[in-house]
Image: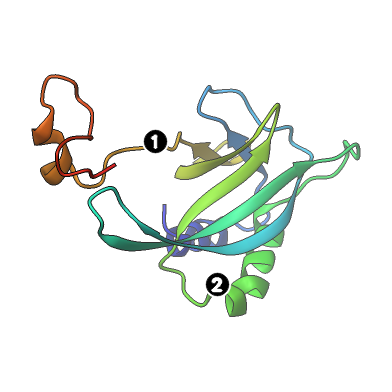
Amino acid sequence: MLLKHLLQFLQSCPDSGLHIMLPDRSFVPAHFHVTEVALVLKDFVDCGVTRRSTASCTLQIWVADDVDHRLNSSKLLKILELAQPVLGTDELAVELEYETSVTAVYPLSAVEQSPSGLLFSLALKHTACLAPELCLPQLPDSGGCCGPTGCC
C-alpha cells in the first residue's frame, strides 16, 4: 500500500482505533507505539548486473510496558504529516518494522475499516531472482539462477 492511500484512510476515519494484524493472523498488542517514521532507500545491483533502487516509508512499531497506551488514526496522521519533510513524497510503499523473536519488516497490504477501528493487514516479504531472463534459462531443471552467465 502506498503512503498516500494510508493517509486517505487516516483522514477519512478520524480518532479511530488502530489494529495491526501480522501475516500469521495474530495481532500486535494494542498498546504499540510508532517510534520511527523512516525513508528507507536501497540501491543495489541484482544478479543480472542491473542497478536498481527502491524507496519505502517504514514505520517502526514498538511495544512497551504501558498497557494503557493507545495510538489512534488522528495521532498517526499527525506523526506522518510531521515526517513529510523527511519522506518527501507520498508515493512510497509503506512497511512496518516489528520485533518479536526477531526484527522483521512487513509490507502493509491493506487497511480496512472495522467496527473497532482501522485494521492494518501485513504481508510477508519475499526474495526472488530479479533477472530470470538471464539466469533461469541456464539451469531450467534446478530452478536456480546460477549458470554460465555467472549471474550469482
Specify the quadrant of the image occupied by residue 134.
top left
Q: Is residue 112 visible?
A: no
138 relative position to 4: left or right? left
Percent coordinates x, y for residue 8 in the rendering: 48, 62
Q: Is tag 1's residue or tag 2's residue first in the polypeptide sequence? A: 2
152 relative position to 62: left or right? left
Specify the quadrant of the image occupied by residue 28.
top right
Residue ID for mark 2: 87
* Mark in front: 1 vs 2: 1
Percent coordinates x, y for residue 32 in the rendering: 76, 42
1 relative position to 29: left or right? left
- Quarter of the picture containing the C terminus is top left
Badge 2: few (under 14), some or many (20 or more) residues near its Cα, within 10 Å?
many
Q: Residue at x 19, y 25 (%)?
A: 143
SS at badge 2: helix
Residue ID for mark 1: 126
Q: Amino acid at mark 2?
A: Leu
The CA distance from mark 1 to mark 2 is 24 Å
Q: Amino acid at mark 1?
A: His
SS at badge 1: loop
Q: Residue at x 54, y 23 (%)?
A: 25
Q: Residue at x 25, y 59 (%)?
A: 50
Is the residue 64 above or below the residue 45 in the image?
above
Is the residue 125 above or below the residue 5 in the image?
above
Specify the quadrant of the image occupied by residue 66.
top right
Percent coordinates x, y for residue 22 in the rendering: 56, 30
